[in-house]
């Protein structure tokens, strides 16, 4: 069974494809090729990643040149085991699109904060079960509250240097999230990767 992560930002042209690419790379490094990482947005589908996002992610070896935006639908949200958004407003929008997915939706920074003190995904546990567990620790009020410190602002129109700074923030958040999965590498491969 494949776990599915959906990353959501406003237009699916900067933040969500950058985060998705970083998460994919970190999961691959852990041998977790069984996890599907997708991204979507609330605006028009079929648009490319902006050039600044493409340039910023080349620093990490990621190629966003072929990325095209996808529109967030209820089917896409419902099929996703974990939904990572860039702002609390976008997290709320996921709940509007799919009330079933609301409990599994977190901002990237919120998930980072909540997952630090929690157990990782256990062997035999699905990502959906883990995300639902993490979501169940929130009160209804917390789910409805917008916390600006959990938001990652849209860098559209900002200079390349700011998009590069954002790429490093997303890189670190994605790396920590990938650590929540048990390694899919054999013990021998894990030893070969150790410093």
Image (tube, grey):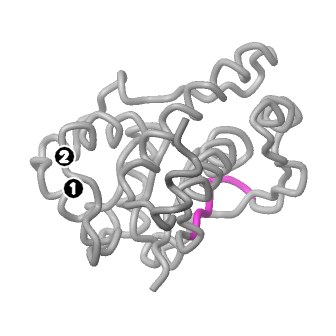
Query: Please, what secondary structure does the residue beneath circle 1 have?
Result: helix
User: Measured along the vertical axis of the image, is residue 163 above or below residue 107?
Assistant: above
Q: Nearer the viewer, residue 106 or 191?
A: 191
Q: Main secondary structure of the magenta part?
A: strand
The residue under the point 52% across, 42% down is 194
Query: Is residue 76 positioned above or below 113 on the image?
Result: below
Residue 39 part of the magenta segment: yes
Picture layout, residue 160 above or below residue 90: above
x and y, in percent, of residue 81 in the image: 40, 70
Q: Please rate how many residues cluster around mark 1, counting C-alpha atoms within 10 Å: few if below 14, some from 14 to 19, many from 20.
A: some
Residue 107, horizontal then vertical, whole percent: 40, 42
| Residue receiving disc 1 | 135
Magenta region: 36-44
- The quadrant in which residue 171 appears is top right
Give me the disc on residue 118: 2
Measured as percent of width and height from the top left, residue 169 is found at 55, 26
**Horizontal side, residue 149 vs residue 190: left or right:** left
Give residue 106's mark: none
Which is closer to the viewer, label 2 or label 1?
2
The span from disc 2 to disc 1 (Cα, nearest Å) is 12 Å
In front of the other: 139 or 174: 174
Residue 194 versus residue 165 in the image, above or below: below
Task: Locate residue 6 relative to residue 93 in the image: left or right.
Answer: right
Marks 2 & 1, CB-CB < 8 Å contact? no
- Mark 2 or mark 1, earlier in chain: 2
- Can you tell which quarter of the image residue 115 is in? top left
């Amino acid at each position: 069974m494949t776990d599915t992560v959906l990353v959501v930002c406003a237009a699916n042209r900067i933040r969500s494809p950058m985060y998705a690419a970083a998460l994919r790379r970190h999961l691959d490094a852990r041998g977790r090729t069984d996890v599907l990482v997708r991204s979507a947005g609330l605006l028009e589908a079929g648009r490319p990643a902006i050039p600044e996002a493409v340039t910023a992610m080349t620093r990490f070896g990621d190629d966003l040149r072929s990325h095209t935006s996808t529109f967030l639908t209820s089917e896409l949200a419902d099929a996703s085991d974990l939904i990572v958004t860039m702002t609390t407003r976008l997290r709320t929008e996921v709940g509007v699109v799919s009330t079933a997915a609301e409990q599994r939706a977190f901002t990237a920074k919120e998930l980072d904060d909540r997952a630090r003190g929690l157990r990782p995904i256990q062997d035999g546990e699905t990502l959906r079960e883990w995300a639902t567990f993490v979501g169940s620790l929130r009160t209804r009020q917390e789910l409805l509250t917008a916390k600006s410190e959990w938001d990652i602002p849209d860098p559209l129109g900002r200079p390349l240097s700011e998009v590069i700074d954002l790429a490093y923030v997303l890189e670190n958040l994605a790396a920590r999230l990938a650590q929540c999965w048990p390694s899919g590498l054999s013990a021998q491969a894990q030893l070969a990767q150790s410093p």
